[in-house]
């Protein structure tokens, strides 16, 4: 299995809702990432988990809350979002051991989020 | 600080023509360089990577890229473009450790004319 699976593919939520995005990989990768991507822009890093511990938080607002329940799963909990948070949210994973796996990101297809 | 510049925002080529997408990087150490492709509404897919060794690297879908340290460049090429190559292309530079931060260029949109 060489895939990163993200659910849901599309999500519409109001500003007072609480929802979650889910990401799963079974490649044995020990790093998992959340990126946010606006239209016609590159992905922006939000969070990195390494060995199930949060290692990078790019000063993301607290209305985004990541969680890594185990080495295969990554969640992004959403609460009290703003319309400007509407974007494609991409999950990625990468292996360990330079150089062959170092930071070679395998991306999921993304979750398209619309905040009304 | 690391940075990546893709000078061409949009490129249009005819099907069957050759393609070159430019990428320049700035990185303090030996760079790990990548090209990713993104079709509309999809995630990014790795085309090829350069870590060390032969400066001409081959990737998937008939793409290749050449690392030129003297020019800080990692340009992507394809000898004959297919309509299915129309997509967004991102060059990226990354650290030599796992779980690090990669830096992406702003991307180049490729349009293929029939």
Image (cartoon, coloured by chain):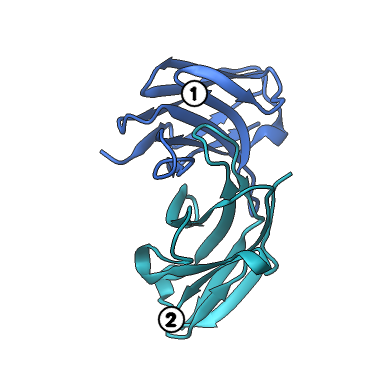
Q: Residue placed farthest to the top in the image?
A: A69
Q: Nearer the viewer, residue B35 or B12?
A: B35
For disc 1, the chain is A
Q: Is residue A6 above or below residue A64?
A: below
Element carrying mark 1:
strand
Percent across and percent down for residue B3 are: 70, 51
Percent across and percent down for residue B108 are: 61, 64
Residue hosting label 2: B79
Q: Residue placed farthest to the left in the image?
A: A1
Q: Is residue B88 above or below residue B101?
A: below
Q: Nearer the viewer, residue B90 or B48?
A: B48
**2 vs 1, front mark:** 1
Residue hosting label 1: A50
For disc 2, the chain is B
Residue at the location (56% across, 34% down)?
B100
Residue at the location (46% across, 40% down)?
A102
Chain with blue colouring: A
User: Chain B is shown in which shade?
Assistant: cyan
Percent across and percent down for residue B83 are: 42, 75
Q: Give the image quarter of residue A23.
A: top left
Left or right of residue A2, residue B64 in this image: right
How far apart marks 2 and 1 lie (CA) works out to 39 Å
Q: Residues within 10 Å of mark 1 (few under 14, many from 20)?
A: many
């Amino acid at each position: 299995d060489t895939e990163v699976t993200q659910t849901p593919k599309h999500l519409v939520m109001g500003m007072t809702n609480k929802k979650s995005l889910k990401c799963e990989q079974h490649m044995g990768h020990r790093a998992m990432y959340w990126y946010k991507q606006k239209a016609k822009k590159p992905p922006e890093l939000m969070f990195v988990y390494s060995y199930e511990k949060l290692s990078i938080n790019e000063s993301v607002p607290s209305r985004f809350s990541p969680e890594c329940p185990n080495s295969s799963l990554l969640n992004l909990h959403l609460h009290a979002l703003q319309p400007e948070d509407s974007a494609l949210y991409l999950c990625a994973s990468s292996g360990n051991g330079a150089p062959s796996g170092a930071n070679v990101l395998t991306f999921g297809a993304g979750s398209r989020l619309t905040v009304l | 600080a690391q940075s990546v510049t893709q000078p061409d925002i949009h490129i249009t080529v005819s099907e069957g023509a050759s393609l070159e997408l430019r990428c320049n990087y700035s990185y303090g150490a030996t760079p790990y360089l990548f090209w990713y492709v993104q079709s509309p509404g999809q995630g990014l897919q790795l085309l090829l990577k350069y870590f060390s060794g032969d400066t001409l690297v081959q990737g998937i879908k008939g793409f290749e890229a050449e690392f030129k340290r003297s020019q800080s460049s990692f340009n992507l090429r394809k000898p004959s473009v297919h309509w299915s190559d129309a997509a967004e292309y991102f060059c990226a530079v990354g650290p030599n450790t796992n779980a690090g931060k990669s830096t992406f260029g702003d991307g180049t949109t490729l349009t293929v004319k029939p």
